[in-house]
Amino acid sequence: MNERIKELANEAGLLVHNPNNVPTKLEKFAELIVRECIDICMKNQFDGADNYNNGSVSSAEFIKEHFGVE
């Protein structure tokens, strides 16, 4: 598993009892979230922005909206 995912899980308090071994389901959950973000960016590439910088900003906005994050 990616070290950053471990760090984030630890920061969220998900690895309190077992900080060195990330549960398989948690790893899969993180992978699914990342894949959704990738899908949003790829869709935006073809359906949205007219240039690279606008695409980055609008992808970030789409991801925030998709997950309800402010």
Image (spheres, helix red, strand yellow):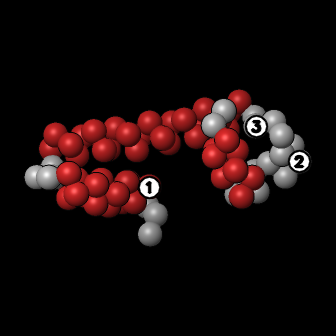
Q: Callout 2 environment at 10 Å: few (<14), some (14 to 19), or many (20+)?
A: few
In the rendered image of this protein, does residue 10 appear above or below residue 37? below
Q: Residue at x 48, y 41 (%)?
A: 34
If the image is split into quadrants, where does the N terminus sit? top right
Q: Amino acid at mark 2?
A: His
Q: Residue at x 63, y 37 (%)?
A: 2
Q: Are marks 1 and 2 in contact (CB under 8 Å)?
A: no
Q: Which mark is residue 6?
A: none
When asked about the image quadrant of residue 39, the answer is top left
- Disc 3 from disc 1: Cα separation: 23 Å
Helix, strand or loop for disc 2: loop
Residue farthest right in this picture: 17
Image coordinates of residue 6 in percent, x first then y, are 70, 44
Q: Callout 1 environment at 10 Å: few (<14), some (14 to 19), or many (20+)?
A: few
Q: Amino acid at mark 3?
A: Val
Dot 1 or dot 2: first in sequence order is: 2
Residue farthest left in this picture: 50
Q: Is residue 53 left or right of residue 25?
A: left
Dot 3 or dot 2: first in sequence order is: 2
Q: How many marks?
A: 3
Label 1 sits on residue: 67
Q: Is residue 3 left or right of residue 61?
A: right
Q: Which mark is residue 17?
A: 2
Q: Nearer the viewer, residue 50 or 32?
A: 50
Q: Is residue 20 left or right of residue 42?
A: right
Label 3 sits on residue: 22
Dot 3 or dot 1: first in sequence order is: 3
Given this view, does label 3 or label 1 mark the residue nearer the observer? 3
Helix, strand or loop for disc 3: loop
Q: Nearer the viewer, residue 6 or 31?
A: 6
Q: Is residue 32 left or right of residue 48?
A: right
Q: Amino acid at mark 1?
A: Phe
